Image (cartoon, grey):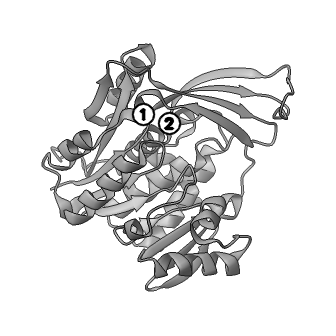
Amino acid sequence: MPSVVCVIGSSNTDMVIKGDKLPAPGETVLGGTFLMNPGGKGANQAVAAVRLANAPNPTATTPSTTVTFVANVGNDIFGQQALDQFEREGIRTDFVTTDADEPSGVALIGVDSKGENSIMVASGANSRLGQEQVAHALAAGLDADNTVVLLQLETPISTVEYAIRQSYERGMRVVLNPAPAQLLDPALLACLYAITPNETEAELLTGIRVTDEATAQQAAGRLHEAGVPNVVITLGSRGAYLSTPSGVSMIAAPPVTAVDTTAAGDCFNGALVIAIAEGLNLPDAVDFACKAASISVTRMGAQASLPYRSEVDSLRLSN
């Protein structure tokens, strides 16, 4: 039976302006380039995963890994465009629901000349992703031994908590990208296979400010104490710190010139769960994810920046 990545999360339309600098409060910055792209952390991660899935054997009747997305979009042009995009990418959309009352989510993104960004999100239909939708998806023939579930925090926390517990009880491996940063029920952490905070999120969850490998180790230790067996702390251009029951390692990212970091974390997480689903060990999976994310930051946009498997494989072979 093929492995499955099930992404549960948000779908937005990103409206991006790239200029020389990000405005300070009360400041208007003139100039820049406008782009409108599909986005949302959940959708970005689902698209990253499907693009990075290993190409199936030409003689196979089904792909080696399928990607299922569970989400809520509005009954509007943005929602229809999102559904069309998911289907073009090859994502299973049986569990993407069209909400009759709420508009699709929208994100307003500013990007400066160094690739740093500032984001405001109107959640819209994402705020109504419910437990019933998740239950339907998890009960729809997913084989627990072959399924990796990936979640973020742009949908109602009650739905996220339900999805984590239900996935855990079914024996599925659950990966949580705890973004945007917020406090979590400590009991929830024991249901995870892995957690993937960045420095800011790790500090909020553990109280430890992550500035280097030593403080990353301390933060990972706190998360292990809470019951998470595998901790991946992403460190931007420096790569990622991995801590598992088998040991710890600092995994470097390839050096690149960043032009837009908007979806780098989403690319990392989509790549990570695909690698896990395909059977890579965690150090190799994190290395794969670092390489995928390093490609994404060299391009503008969210989903538009996400690489394909052939690009990452080429980078892996060149290093």
Residue 220 at x, y percent in the picture = 56, 76
Instruction: Residue at 41% x, 68% y: name it.
Output: 189
Indicate the amino acid at tag 2: Gly
Q: CA distance from mark 2 to mark 1?
A: 9 Å
- Which residue appears at 42% of the width and 74% of the height? 228
Residue type pointed to by label 1: Asn
User: x, y (%) of residue 38?
Assistant: 50, 28
Compared across the picture, whether 17 is left or right of 305 comes to: right
The residue that mark 1 highlights is 126
Task: Judge from the rendering whether residue 311 lies leftward or rightward of residue 60; answer left or right.
Answer: right
User: Where does the image place residue 120, in percent across and percent down from the top left?
Assistant: 64, 33
Q: SS of the residue at dot 1?
A: helix
Residue 277, image quadrant: bottom left
Q: Quadrant of residue 32?
A: top right
Can you see residue 234? no
| Quadrant placement of the C terminus | bottom right
Q: Mark 2, mark 1: which one is toward the viewer?
A: 1
Relative vertical location of residue 273 with respect to residue 75 in this rendering, above or below: below
Mark 2 element type = loop
Residue in front for this viewpoint, 190 or 215: 190
**Residue hosting label 2:** 40
Residues under numbered marks 2 and 1 in contact, where contact means CB atoms less than 8 Å apart? yes
Is residue 158 shown left or right of residue 124?
left
**Which residue is painted at 47% across and 65% down in the image?**
195
